[in-house]
Amino acid sequence: MAPERFRGVGNEPALDVYSFGTLLYRMLGGTLPFVGDELDPMQLGDEKLANDAPPLAPLCPDVPADVVAWVMRALARDPHQRPSASEMAQAFAGLLAREVA
């Protein structure tokens, strides 16, 4: 769940970008960026509101740096600092095209 959801912010597209970033972080790094106590979900919210996601690069050193950078941008605490879904789609389409070529 995106940090702003813990503040009660409505359904914004940036929430989906954050969720996509979380999915990619887990796929590439093998762990979630934040792991909270399931008995205290507010603790997880406090952690997300106060801290940036831990760096992904050390968890997946073989993943290209630009891929890691896009994942970390998607996990920005401030939703205005996240790329739009369109920007993410274009970036990953370009990355995939580069890998196929």
Image (spheres, grey):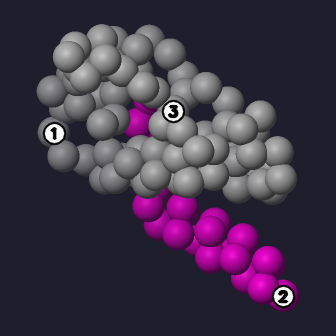
| Magenta stretch: helix, strand or loop mostly | helix
Tag 1's secondary structure?
A: loop
Residue 24 rendering spot, x and y as whole percentages: 54, 53
Bin the neighbour count of mark 3 within 10 Å (Cα to Cα): few under 14, some 14-19, many 20 and up.
many
Instruction: Kindly check if marks 2 and 3 are in contact, taking CB atoms under 8 A apart as contact.
Output: no
Q: List the residue tagged with mark 2.
A: 101
Q: Residue drawn 25% across and 23% down?
A: 38
Please state which of the two labelled residues, at mark 3 or mark 1, is closer to the viewer. 3
Disc with the residue nearer the chain's start (3 vs 1): 1
Q: Which residues are magenta?
A: 77-101
Residue 95 rendering spot, x and y as whole percentages: 72, 71
* Residue 73 can be seen in this image: no
Pick the residue in front: 72 or 43.
Answer: 43
Amino acid under disc 3: Pro
Q: List the residue tagged with mark 3.
A: 33
**Quarter of the C terminus within the rendering:** bottom right
Q: Quadrant of residue 99?
A: bottom right
- Residue 31, placed above or below residue 93: above
Amino acid under disc 1: Gly
Mark 2–mark 3 Cα distance, whole angstroms, equals: 31 Å
Left or right, residue 48 beside residue 94: left
- Residue 84, placed above or below residue 86: above
